[in-house]
Image: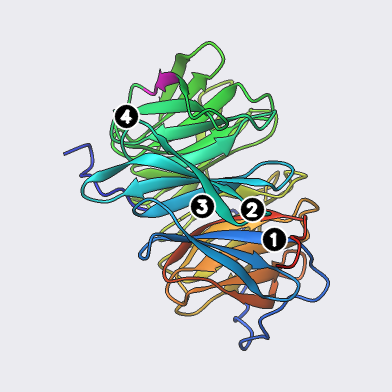
Amino acid sequence: MRPAVALPLALALAAPVAAPLAAPLAAQVPGVAGTLVVTNKRPSTLTILDVASGRTLATLPTGAGPHEVVLSRDGRTAVVTDYGGRPAGTTLTVVDVPSARVTRTIPLGEYRAPHGLVFLPGDSLVAVTSEATGNVVVVHVGDGAVRRAVPTQAAGSHMVAVAADGATAFTGNMGAHSVSRLDLRAGTHVASWPVPNVPEAIGVTPDGREVWVGSNALHRVSVLDVATGAVTTAADSVDWPYRVLFTPDARTVLIPDMNRDVVRFLDRASRRELGRLAVPGGGPQGITLTPDGRHAFLSLSKEGRVVVIDVTARRVVGSLAAGETPDGVAFTPTVQPRR
């Protein structure tokens, strides 16, 4: 989502024809089992869904303007960033998914406008951007304590991506038109590189060598080589590259284009576009994958639902009702007990 504060704080081959969105499907996804958690920005709620049946298990209150959500590896704990608006939010909401209840609201104090969010290895800590203060804050989920704040040395640090080592983080700095590299364990800023203007979407390969970042102003997705600092173009004419998501094997890149109502699929190594999936009028935003990478879940902010995508076939295979203006999505293969 574009930040509420002013900024700064003031393909190689021709694209294949986009496949159209299939007609609305039944609110169930045969063959895909698990639980989906979705943030709904306008009503400030979180929806918990059973994927196979399409049932809504619970709708819970969050702080104002929830945007991003992450799940612990065991699927039991969800953490939500309460981004707010005017004024900016200052909390995280913690949810116990099996019991469908809010267990804690974590105050972040001075660290306002929390947005990008990642669970760190071990699932006791999360790293979250404080867009308003230019920090990535490391928070202990269990006791709610802020363990450290790592300065990005840039304005508008909106999203964060973390390499597999759990220590190396990168932020897209929308106000400074840059990417920052941080050492989360040492609590230090390591480096910054200029990238095409207004970088929002960001992703990093597991080895930490490539950072893919979307430019909202220049409508392209670029690749930053961390070793050399070189920035090259991976995709052009992406009007609003809302998110960048790698499949688990890091071979395919999924890019929802919010304004063009399409999802683009790129081969990471060659940067060749593999295909597109049109979601007319949907307003695609948040996206996540099943652990095997076979299915993606994409929130459609204008339609109050999440579609399920077969990644290989690049087609919609199911649809799930969410709340109004859904954004962040997180999935666990754990099926919740019936209540």
* Residue located farthest toward the left when viewing the structure as drawn: 10
Could you say which is closer to the camera, residue 304 or residue 142? Answer: 142
Q: CA distance from mark 1 to mark 4?
A: 32 Å
Locate residue 22: give its quadrant: bottom right
Find numbered disc 1 in the image and state the secondary structure of the residue it sits on: strand
The three-letter amino acid code for the residue at tag 2 is: Val
Most extreme residue toward the bottom is 23
Q: Which mark is residue 35?
A: 1
Mark carried by residue 243: 3
**Secondary structure at numbered mark 4:** loop
Q: Which residue is mark 2?
A: 97
The majority secondary structure of the magenta stretch comes to: strand
Quadrant (top left, top right, bottom left, bottom right) of the N terminus = bottom left
Give the residue type at disc 1: Thr
The amino acid at mark 3 is: Arg
The image shows residue 95, relative to residue 28, as above or below, that is above
| Residue 272 in magenta stretch | no
Q: Is residue 265 above or below residue 192?
A: below
Dot 4 crowding, Cα within 10 Å, few <14, some 14–19, many 20+: few
Q: Residue 190 location in percent, x, y? A: 47, 15
Do residues under tags 4 and 2 come within 8 Å of each other at their CB atoms?
no
Instruction: Report if residue 285 is visible in the image.
Output: yes
Q: Amino acid at mark 4?
A: Gly
| Earlier sequence position, callout 1 versus callout 4 | 1
First reached walking from the N terminus: tag 4 or tag 2: 2
Q: Crowdedness of circle 1 by 10 Å Cα count: few (<14), some, many (20+)?
A: many
Looking at the image, tell me whether mark 3 or mark 2 is earlier in sequence order: 2
Disc number for residue 109: 4
Residue numbers of the magenta segment: 148-152
Q: Nearer the viewer, mark 1 or mark 3?
A: 1
Distance Cα–Cα, label 3 vs label 2:
25 Å
Q: Residue at x 54, y 76 (%)?
A: 279
